[in-house]
Image: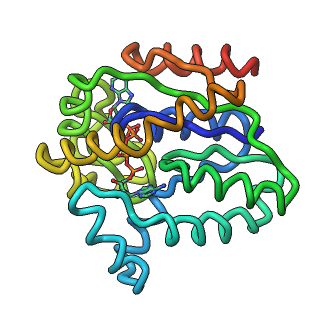
């Protein structure tokens, strides 16, 4: 299956994508994770992207398009994938259509995880992340041992863009640039909207039911 997860920053895309990838056996493609890895390795691309990420702004479409085109040429995406954080603008959605046409695929479903804006700051300020990709929350999903990843044992960290001022910018970017994708995919008959305010396992069950898997 080829699935897009849409939603506000902190709405649970990464959490659900990780669970879906295990269930469906297809890779999770998180543009945020790919960008953070490039920032960590201090590649020229990462150095350029960091300026936007630290300010809570979207990285320019031209950089993201190339990144996705390259990722989709890798063999592990042949049977499907779950996009987590892409596309985020109309231009990115159009680029995806072009890439799909050239590689011979179309998107099967777009899952919009709908969460109230009030919940977002609480979720993001309590988020703890691991270098291995695992994501926790100090209240709703704490690790067994405080500050330590259950999966790989590494120390958890707080993302630099999970500060309140940056979160506000990320939400503003979502409203201006990403929300229009809801209409776009609704018109294409691909959109399902899930109430993301429920518990993690309930949201997951609702997504599986909506996808019919
Ligand atoms: P990215 O990493 O994609 O960040 P985001 O979209 O802001 O999303 P998050 O990763 O913050 O949240 P999420 O929805 O995955 O929620 P999570 O599951 O972690 O992007 C970062 C930056 O990179 C962007 O600002 C931009 O600069 C750049 N970028 C990335 N992609 C780009 C693109 N395509 N174009 C341009 N720029 C791009 O959950 C959050 C917390 O809530 C966790 O602690 C979790 O445990 C908890 N939680 C999850 N679900 C629930 C629940 N149901 N109940 C209670 N708690 C929950």
Which quarter of the image is occupied by the C terminus?
top right
Say which of 175 and 167 sits in front.
175
Relative side of 191 to 51, left or right: right
Relative side of 84 to 79, left or right: left
Q: Is 121 drawn above or below residue 157 in the view shown?
A: above
Relative side of 174 to 195, left or right: left
Q: Is 70 drawn above or below residue 191 in the view shown?
A: below
Say which of 91 and 42 sits in front.
91
Picture residue at 62% right of the left edge, 63% below the top: 68
Furthest toward the bottom, the residue is 44
Picture residue at 52% right of the left edge, 53% below the top: 30
Q: Is 195 drawn above or below residue 71 in the view shown?
A: above
Question: Whole-percent x and y of residue 176?
Answer: 35, 42
- The number of callouts visible is 0
Say which of 207 and 131 sits in front.
207
Q: Is 72 drawn above or below residue 39 in the view shown?
A: above
Picture residue at 61% right of the left edge, 39% below the top: 4
Which corner quadrant of the image does residue 72 belong to? bottom right
Which corner quadrant of the image does residue 159 belong to? bottom left
Picture residue at 60% right of the left edge, 72% below the top: 66
Which corner quadrant of the image does residue 39 belong to? bottom left
Furthest toward the left, the residue is 165
Question: Whole-percent x and y of residue 193?
Answer: 54, 19
Question: Whole-percent x and y of residue 3?
Answer: 67, 38
Which quarter of the image is occupied by the N terminus?
top right
Question: Whole-percent x and y of residue 9?
Answer: 35, 40
Question: Please, which colouring scheme is shown?
Answer: rainbow
Quarter of image, ligand 1: top left
């Amino acid at each position: 299956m080829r699935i897009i997860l849409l939603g506000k920053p902190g709405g649970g895309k990464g959490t659900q994508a990780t669970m879906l990838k295990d269930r469906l056996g297809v890779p999770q493609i998180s543009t945020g994770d790919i960008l953070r890895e490039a920032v960590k390795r201090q590649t020229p691309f990462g150095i350029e992207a960091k300026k936007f990420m630290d300010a809570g702004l979207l990285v320019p479409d031209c950089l993201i398009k190339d990144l996705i085109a390259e990722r989709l040429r890798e063999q592990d995406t042949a049977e499907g994938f779950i996009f987590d954080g892409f596309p985020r603008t109309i231009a990115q959605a159009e680029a995806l259509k072009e890439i799909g046409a050239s590689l011979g695929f179309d998107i099967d479903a777009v899952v919009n995880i709908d969460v109230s804006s009030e919940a977002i700051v609480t979720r993001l300020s309590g988020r703890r992340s691991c270098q291995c990709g695992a994501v926790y929350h100090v209240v709703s999903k704490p690790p067994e041992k405080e500050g330590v990843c259950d999966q790989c044992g590494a120390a958890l960290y707080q993302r630099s863009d999970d500060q309140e001022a940056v979160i506000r910018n990320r939400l503003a970017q979502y409203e201006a640039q990403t929300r229009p994708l809801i209409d776009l995919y609704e018109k294409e008959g691909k959109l399902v909207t899930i109430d993301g305010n429920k518990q993690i396992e309930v949201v997951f069950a609702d997504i599986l039911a909506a996808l019919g898997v």
